[in-house]
């Protein structure tokens, strides 16, 4: 074996040459062999340069397949919630590995990622595409941090832009129609989503001791994950207490009476499946929510649209943004405004009338020709 300033060169029985070098306390072997010693030395010089520039990647890591990378990525964070893990795993299994799974990680290019995204966009809603792409981007960012690729192939990817006009803003009358169509045992869940702005998991995770009906308050301490596990909210802002109006107090009192729950059942969930177990989102959605919105003539509306309706109504009613932020459990005001608040038609008309009075004053009804005189 001959030696040089960086790395080692070994002639194989086949007559070809093998290159290796030491880096990060491990011996790294070139993924291919070479015809001449000069080719080996050129390759080693390039490797030495990438190390000095901080651009070195692990050749063994780059040779793993995308499917193998996905398995390692899923195991990287044991603190991730089981429902989030299940969602990410489903996205990878259904939408990513069938297309890229057998490719080596280092072979995946931005063109491959863009083609993958474009294929999704032809069949799926823009928001679904964005959500799936977020998993792919995190997957290859992990590979880049682990030095298995020089850079992520997700740079510069163009995504479809969600059309906010497709998201309807539910009116109070439409919310009432949904509530009327939901079985009585779960009707109050609809009002908690719309009036208090709770997420589905927050509603499903409410326990008896979450309520103080005498004071007219409700406290969110936990949320139910989509696979039926109680967990603390993801952010500190998610833990909050809010006042509730008298009609909702009445709904909750009626629900407690109908289910036989009392103040002694402090840790018991307010809403449970027919067998007494915690709700599972997918089952609840298919058996309760989907038939109800279909009956109400609002097919396609999601439970989360109740929360958006709550935010939009607070904005329309002039409720200050910090109060809205607290009630929705947002960590930032920007999220409250940018993600959930939608202009409602009545607020738009009121704005038009106020602007008209401001700019035209008493002449607002006069024709332009009359105003000219």
Image (cartoon, rainbow, N blue to C red):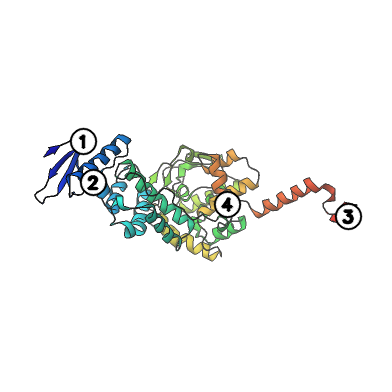
Among numbered discs 4 and 1, the one appearing first in the sequence: 1
Mark 2 surroundings: few (<14), some (14-19) or many (≥20) residues within 10 A = few
**What residue is disc 3 on?**
370
Q: Which numbered mark, 1 or 3, is in the foreground of this view?
A: 1
Tell me if residue 81 can be seen.
no
**What residue is disc 4 on?**
309
**What residue is disc 2 on?**
60
Q: Which numbered mark, 4 or 3, is in the foreground of this view?
A: 3
Q: Residue at x 46, y 37 (%)?
A: 236
Mark on residue 168?
none
Where residue 160 appears, as percent x and y from the top left, is: 49, 56
Mark 3 surroundings: few (<14), some (14-19) or many (≥20) residues within 10 A = few
Q: Are marks 4 and 2 in contact (CB under 8 Å)?
A: no
Q: Are marks 1 and 3 in contact (CB under 8 Å)?
A: no
Among numbered discs 2 and 1, the one appearing first in the sequence: 1
Q: In this view, which residue lies farthest toward the right?
A: 373
Mark on residue 6?
1
Among numbered discs 4 and 3, the one appearing first in the sequence: 4
Where residue 171 appears, as percent x and y from the top left, is: 61, 56
Q: CA distance from mark 3 to mark 2?
A: 82 Å
Where residue 200 appears, as percent x and y from the top left, is: 47, 51
Tell me if residue 309 can be seen.
yes
Q: Which numbered mark, 4 or 2, is in the foreground of this view?
A: 2
Among numbered discs 3 and 2, the one appearing first in the sequence: 2
Q: Which numbered mark, 2 or 1, is in the foreground of this view?
A: 1
């Amino acid at each position: 074996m001959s030696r040089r300033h960086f790395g080692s060169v070994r002639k194989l029985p086949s007559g070809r040459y093998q290159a290796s070098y030491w880096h990060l306390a491990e011996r790294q072997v070139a993924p291919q062999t070479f015809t001449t010693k000069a080719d080996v030395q050129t390759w080693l010089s390039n490797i030495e340069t990438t190390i000095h520039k901080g651009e070195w990647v692990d050749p063994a890591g780059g040779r793993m397949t995308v499917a193998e990378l996905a398995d390692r990525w899923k195991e990287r964070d044991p603190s991730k919630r089981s429902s989030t893990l299940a969602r990410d795993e489903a996205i990878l299994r259904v939408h990513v590995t069938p297309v890229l799974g057998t490719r080596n990680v280092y072979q995946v290019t931005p063109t491959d990622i863009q083609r993958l995204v474009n294929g999704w966009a032809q069949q799926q809603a823009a928001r679904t595409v964005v959500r799936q792409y977020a998993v792919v981007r995190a997957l290859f960012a992990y590979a880049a941090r682990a030095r298995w690729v020089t850079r992520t192939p997700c740079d510069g990817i163009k995504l479809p832009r969600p059309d906010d006009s497709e998201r309807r803003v539910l009116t109070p009358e439409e919310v009432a129609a949904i509530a009327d169509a939901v079985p009585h045992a779960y009707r109050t869940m609809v009002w908690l989503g719309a009036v208090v702005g709770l997420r589905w998991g927050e509603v499903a995770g409410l326990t008896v001791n979450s309520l103080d009906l005498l004071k007219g308050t409700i406290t969110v301490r936990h949320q139910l994950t989509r696979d039926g596990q109680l967990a603390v909210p993801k952010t500190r802002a998610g833990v909050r207490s809010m006042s509730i109006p008298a009609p909702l107090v009445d709904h909750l009192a009626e629900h407690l009476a109908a289910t036989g729950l009392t103040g002694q059942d402090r840790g018991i969930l307010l809403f449970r499946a027919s067998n007494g177990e915690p709700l599972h989102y997918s089952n609840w959605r298919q058996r309760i929510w989907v038939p109800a919105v279909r009956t109400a003539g609002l097919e396609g509306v999601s439970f989360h649209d109740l929360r958006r309706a709550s935010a939009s109504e607070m904005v329309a009613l002039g409720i200050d943004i910090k109060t809205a932020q607290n009630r929705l459990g947002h960590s930032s005001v920007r999220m409250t405004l940018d993600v959930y608040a939608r202009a409602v038609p009545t607020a738009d008309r009121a704005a038009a009338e106020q602007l008209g009075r401001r700019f035209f004053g008493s002449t607002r009804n006069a024709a332009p020709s009359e105003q000219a005189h």
